[in-house]
Image (spheres, rainbow, N blue to C red):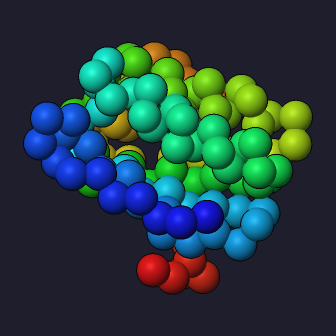
Amino acid sequence: MMARRGQPGSAGMVIETVTSDGVKAVVAVEGEIDMSNSDDLRSYLQRYVAAGYERIAVDMSGVSFVDSTGLRAVVMTSLDLRAVGEVTVRNPSPIVRALIDLSGLQETLPIEASDPEDRV
């Protein structure tokens, strides 16, 4: 799949595919995720579910703000994929980690550190 870069500004979010091998994808998200762009994130992740990927790692280290709709986009993708695989949150920024913890979603959205095998 092709990487897509958004432009920070009105939408406030950038999404990029870091690695993709047909089974596992690493998708990096930067900026602000809220109700104005959470559907874009959901659509982007959903392409990997539709293509049969078994694992999606969403790197959220560059996320400066996320609201419940942004987290919901990742949760819904996780629920879609749960029969065949999983979605993990990689290197969550403090704001993302806090929202996952406050929402009680640690089991639905497992947190992982970077994998040195994943190369840009």
Percent of width and height locating residue 84: 87, 43
Furthest-left residue in view? Answer: 9
Towards the viewer: 2 or 35: 2
Residue at the right extreme of this rendering:
83
Q: Position of residue 83 (x, y in %)?
A: 88, 34
* Residue 84 visible somewhere in the drawing: yes
In the rendered view, tell whether residue 17 sits above or below residue 93.
below
Residue 91: tell me if it is visible: no
Q: How many marks?
A: 0
On screen, 27 above or below 107? below
Which quadrant, please, contains the N terminus? bottom right
- Residue 68 point in image, percent of width and height: 38, 17
* Residue at screen point 40% across, 18% down: 69
Relative to 78, is 37 on the left or the right?
left
Relative side of 115 to 23, left or right = left
Q: Quadrant location of residue 64? A: top left
Q: Nearer the viewer, residue 95 or 47?
A: 47
Q: Residue at x 51, y 50 (%)?
A: 58
Left-right relation of 26 to 49: left
Between 89 and 54, the one lying in front of the other is 54
Instruction: Decide which of 77, 97 is in the foreground and name it.
Output: 77
Q: Residue at x 32, y 18 (%)?
A: 35
Residue at 56 percent across and 77 percent down: it is 118
Residue 63, image x, y percentages: 27, 45
The answer to whether 69 is drawn above or below residue 118 in the figure is above
The quadrant in which the C terminus is found is: bottom left
Which corner quadrant of the image does residue 12 belong to? top left
